[in-house]
C-alpha cells in the first residue's frame, strides 16, 4: 500500500483549510512526528486518516480525518494532563472549544463498551488525571478532542495546541479507575 500524502486530500478543502492542513503537517513532521496514513472506506464513509505520533514520547499528538465524513482534527491532551512548563492551552480556549474539553470527563470513544468500565464510559479502563483551577478532572488517554476544520475554525488556537502537544516530553500521570462489579 502506498503512503497517502495529506496534500492529496487537502486539495478537496477550501483554500484556508487546505493551507492550514499543509502547514500543520509540515509543523508536526519538522517537530519530530511520525505520520501514518490510511484510507478508511466502508458503507458510511471514505476518509483518509492521518495519525501523528511523537517519535520522542511515542504518544499520539493528533489525528486528522479528511473525506466524505468531513474534515476534522482530534487533538490529544498530553500537555495539560502533565504540565511541563511549556504552556497550557486551557486558559486560552474560546468558550465553545473550552466547553468541548471541559465537558468530556468520560471516554471519547464513539461507541463506549459499558461492560468494560461502567462508571466512566471508558473502554480502556485508564484515564488521564489533570487539575484545572483546583478541580481534578479525568480524560480518556486514547480519545481526543474533536474539532471541525472549516473556514470558521480557530486556526491560531489549533496551531498553538499542536505546538504544545509536539513540545510535550513528560510522563503522563495515570489513575486506574475502579471498576464497578456487575450485578
Image (tube, rainbow, N blue to C red):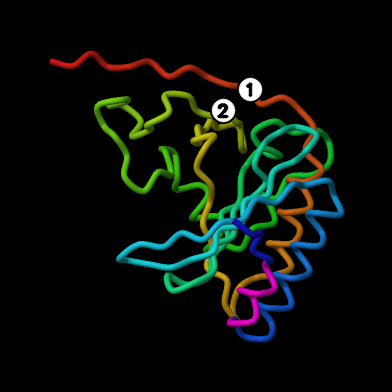
Q: Secondary structure at mark 1?
A: loop
The answer to which quarter of the image holds residue 30 is: bottom right
Whole-percent x and y of residue 175?
52, 19
State which region is magenta.
Answer: 6-12
17 shown above or below 2: below
Q: Which residue occupies the foreground of this view, 74 or 154?
A: 74
The answer to whether residue 75 is left or right of residue 45 is right
Q: Secondary structure at mark 2?
A: strand
Q: Is residue 169 magenta?
A: no
The answer to which quarter of the image holds residue 29 is: bottom right
81 shown above or below 30: above
The residue furthest front is: 1
Q: Residue at x 56, y 27 (%)?
A: 129
Whole-percent x and y of residue 106?
41, 38
Q: Residue at x 45, y 45 (%)?
A: 104
The answer to which quarter of the image holds residue 121 is: top left
The residue furthest right is: 30
The residue that label 2 is drawn on is: 129
Q: Which quadrant of the figure contains the N terminus?
A: bottom right
The answer to whether residue 112 is left or right of residue 58 is left
**What is the CA distance from the residue labelled 2 to the residue labelled 1?**
6 Å
Q: Main secondary structure of the magenta part?
A: helix
Whole-percent x and y of residue 67?
49, 72
Q: Which quadrant of the figure contains the C terminus?
A: top left
Q: Earlier in the sequence, mark 2 or mark 1?
A: 2
The residue that label 1 is drawn on is: 173
Whether residues under marks 2 and 1 lie with C-beta atoms below 8 angstroms apart, the answer is yes
Q: Residue at x 64, y 59 (%)?
A: 2
28 shown above or below 84: below
Amino acid at each position: 500500500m502506498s503512503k497517502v500524502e495529506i496534500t492529496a486530500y487537502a486539495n478537496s478543502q477550501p483554500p484556508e483549510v487546505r493551507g492550514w492542513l499543509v502547514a500543520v503537517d509540515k509543523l508536526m513532521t519538522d517537530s519530530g512526528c511520525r505520520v501514518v496514513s490510511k484510507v478508511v472506506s466502508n458503507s458510511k464513509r471514505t476518509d483518509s486518516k492521518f495519525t501523528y505520533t511523537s517519535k520522542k514520547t511515542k504518544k499520539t499528538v493528533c489525528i486528522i480525518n479528511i473525506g466524505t465524513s468531513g474534515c476534522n482534527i482530534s487533538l490529544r491532551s498530553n500537555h495539560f494532563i502533565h504540565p511541563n512548563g511549556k504552556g497550557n492551552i486551557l486558559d486560552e480556549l474560546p468558550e465553545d472549544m473550552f466547553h468541548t474539553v471541559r465537558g468530556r470527563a468520560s471516554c471519547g470513544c464513539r461507541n463506549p463498551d459499558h461492560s468494560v468500565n461502567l462508571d466512566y464510559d471508558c473502554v480502556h479502563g485508564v484515564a488521564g488525571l489533570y487539575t484545572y483551577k483546583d478541580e481534578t478532572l479525568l480524560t480518556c488517554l486514547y480519545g481526543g478532542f474533536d474539532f471541525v476544520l472549516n473556514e470558521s475554525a480557530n486556526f491560531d488556537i489549533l496551531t498553538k495546541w499542536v505546538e504544545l502537544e509536539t513540545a510535550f516530553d513528560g510522563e503522563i500521570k495515570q489513575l486506574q479507575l475502579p471498576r464497578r462489579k456487575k450485578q
